[in-house]
Image (cartoon, rainbow, N blue to C red):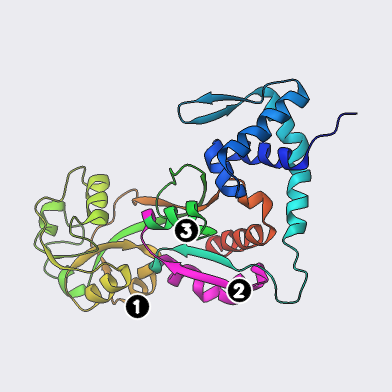
Amino acid sequence: MATHNLEHLRTFLTVYRAGSLTEAARLLGISQPTASTHIHSLEQNLGLRLFERTTSGVKPTTKADGLARDVGTHIDALDDLAYIPTLPGANKSIDLGGPAEFLTAKLLPHTPELTAAVGARLRISFGLVDGLLEDLRAGDLDLVISSVQPRVQGVTGMPLYDEEFVLVAAPSWQSRLPGDAADEAELAVIPVVAYAENMPIVRRYWRSVFERRPDNLRTSVIIPDLRGVRAAIVAGAGMSVLPHYLVEEDLASGALTALHAPEVAPLNTVYLATRTGELERNHQLRSLTSAIQRLTRA
């Protein structure tokens, strides 16, 4: 029975999952020529072709699909053993990044459950999605909560949570409108508290609900943190579009009111992003991911 070099099989599996020799080499900490040599040697030993080169990377053959099924669980099991610490307290830290608003509102209240799931130190980083995904690809982060579907080579995203958006203001602004169901033109009298100069969240809401750009709106203040936007509109600074989870208690208490009730509320899918193949190799990461899925959907 033929035997094969374990490192060559590990390289094969990483290339298969990453879809790129360059990214696989980075994940494994080896050079691209070394990764290519591993694949070439394995193909010679097996007597078959495993990958076809494409302009965007490599494409596995049907033989590669079968080999990945055969060896994947075994390679992952061996890699799991490598994460078992030899000394007390030696567990690897897990670095989690995401939008400050989402992490603070949805996950940090459950910090004890998250750290218990990891079984080691959990480091939290706040940031904007593009920078976070690049840090993930580069290995500086292990897991990212992404407000957009990841389209970074070597990064895989899975849907986590659908955030519902609502147009809100302090009740004093509602009293200035002619009725309970204000139309798009009537809302223009209220200044906007925006997250950024180009009002990205408000613009998305206007396109989805009113099927036009919010060109007739004016901003009163720009605050690059949704928690700050919320505080400003509670104080009466104007209106804004915010995730429902961030203003749920304010709506219930009457501190804020919904200015518009569309038939279908605009939604945005939040993703859990990891480096391709890392979730299968790292049992701590799998445990944390499962905990986050459970806590956000509760």
92 left or right of 86? left
Determine the secondary structure under disc 3: strand
161 left or right of 90? left
Point out residue 227 in the picture as x, y percentages from the top left corner.
32, 72
User: Which is more foreground, mark 1 or mark 3?
Assistant: 3
**Could you say which is closer to the camera, residue 16 or residue 101?**
16
Q: Which residue is mark 2?
A: 121
Tags 1 and 2 in contact by the CB under 8 Å rule?
A: no
Badge 1: residue crowd in 10 Å (few <14, some 14–19, many ≥20):
few
The prevailing secondary structure element of the residues shown in magenta is helix
Residue type at mark 2: give it. Arg
Q: Work out how far the residue at label 2 is from the one at label 3, CA to CA, in angstroms.
A: 18 Å
Res 253 label: 1
Residue type at mark 1: give it. Ser
Q: Work out how far the residue at label 1 is from the one at label 3, CA to CA, in angstroms.
A: 29 Å
- Asked if the magenta segment contains residue 241, the reply would be no
Q: Which residue is pictured at 67% across the width and 36% down the height?
A: 12
Quadrant into which the C terminus falls: bottom right
Residue type at mark 3: give it. Ile
The mark that comes first in sequence, 2 or 3, is 2
Q: Which residue is mark 3?
A: 145
Boundaries of the magenta span? 102-130
**Could you say which is closer to the camera, residue 72 or residue 268?**
72
Point out residue 281 in the picture as x, y percentages from the top left corner.
68, 51
Q: Which residue is pictured at 58% across the width and 36% down the height?
A: 33
Point out residue 255 in the picture as x, y percentages from the top left corner.
28, 77
